[in-house]
Amino acid sequence: MDLPVWQALRDELRPQGLEIVAVAMDTNVAAAYPWIDAAKTSYPQLLDPEHSLGARLGIINVPMSVWIDEQGMLVRPAEPAFAPRERGYGSVELPEGTPQRMKEMLAEAAKLEVDFQQTARMLRDWVQSGAKSRYALTPDEVVARSAPRPKEISLAAANFELGQHLHRTGHEAAARPFFRAAHRLQPENWTYKRQAWSMVDPLQGPTEHYDSDWLSDVRKIGAKHYYAKVDA
Amino acid sequence: MILERLDPSAAELASGTGWELKPEGACKAEVCMPLPKDARRADGRVNVPVVANALGMALVADEARGLWALGPVSGGRALSTAVAPEITLPARDGNPFRLGSLKGTKVFLCAWASW
């Protein structure tokens, strides 16, 4: 779990002027509470049940981050961001009785090509060098590096929002066609998919309600494409 | 934003999307986009299909329940400017937290989820 790991980095870098802000992208905010409460962090823990950071910043999976400087300027757009850890996803000892699907998911997660030290390395450099850091991008670079937004992405966002609204107001079955449309229109948006899949199966496995599932989709694109490489 | 009618007030549109209707068009932060004359009805309310079309916002209907969702502006990139958007989200303690309150500090904003 990343929240306590971020706390350690926050303890190190807060005296030098960096604050960490975590945002839980759970539609059901109560699902995030146990994680937040157990982590006992001193940095802000925010909730985005509407997934508004998708439309506003281009967050399409978790974990992803943006950097904002002292003047309120974005200096890095949405990109994958990893809490520093010694061992990657999928390298945990599994207790007996772990469901087969969970084992397969973790085996797939172990294939993600992630440098877990990269984000912390970049943040330390930014804290030390500020705007002179090679990782602090110019406004033009930030805009140019943010993802293109064709009409399909607006359509996906509108479908997802309608699905969320219906789900929340007790129309779960009516919500699903809108979630499915969002998945079809923006397949690279994993928050839309993982959120909807987890509403019917916590392991995000195949169900009658959706055309795909986490394991199948990751295998289809190849685990190394699950998180875009961070262009430092 | 979720709509229960296709002619909300300009104030409702602004609070749902951040786009304000001004004489020069639809404006958000320092960006203004021109709008056709019929973007506002005679009574001053917003003609949502016209605005959606002009700004490249998707409009999706749930006819069974008489609801619509209006998507974000499209046509450019996820960020139209590097000025961080005004973001206010609820914190775990229930109070709204304004990201702008951290001005003067470097901020690393990280999205995660329980799933």
Image (cartoon, rainbow, N blue to C red):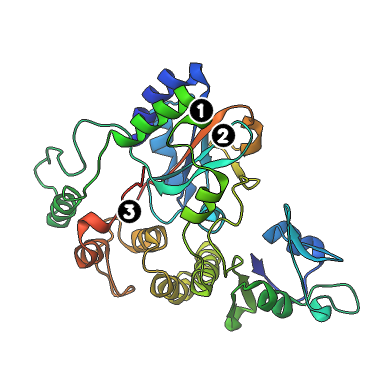
* Residue A158 visible in image: yes
Mark 3 belongs to which amino acid? Ala
Query: Pointer 3 indicates a residue of which chain?
Result: A
Residue A106 coordinates in the image, percent (x, y): 17, 49
Q: How many marks?
A: 3
Residue A159 lies left or right of residue A202; in this view the side is right
Secondary structure found at label 1? helix
Disc 2: which residue: A69
Q: Are marks 2 and 1 on the same chain?
A: yes
| C-alpha span from label 2 to label 3 | 23 Å
Disc 3: which residue: A228
Mark 2 belongs to which amino acid? Asp
Which residue shows up at 59% across the image and 48% down it? B82
Say which label, 2 or 1, has the lower sequence index: 2
Disc 1: which residue: A130
Quadrant of res A188: bottom left
Asked if disc 2 and disc 3 are in contact, CB closer than 8 Å, the reply is: no
Q: Nearer the viewer, residue A121 or A188?
A: A121
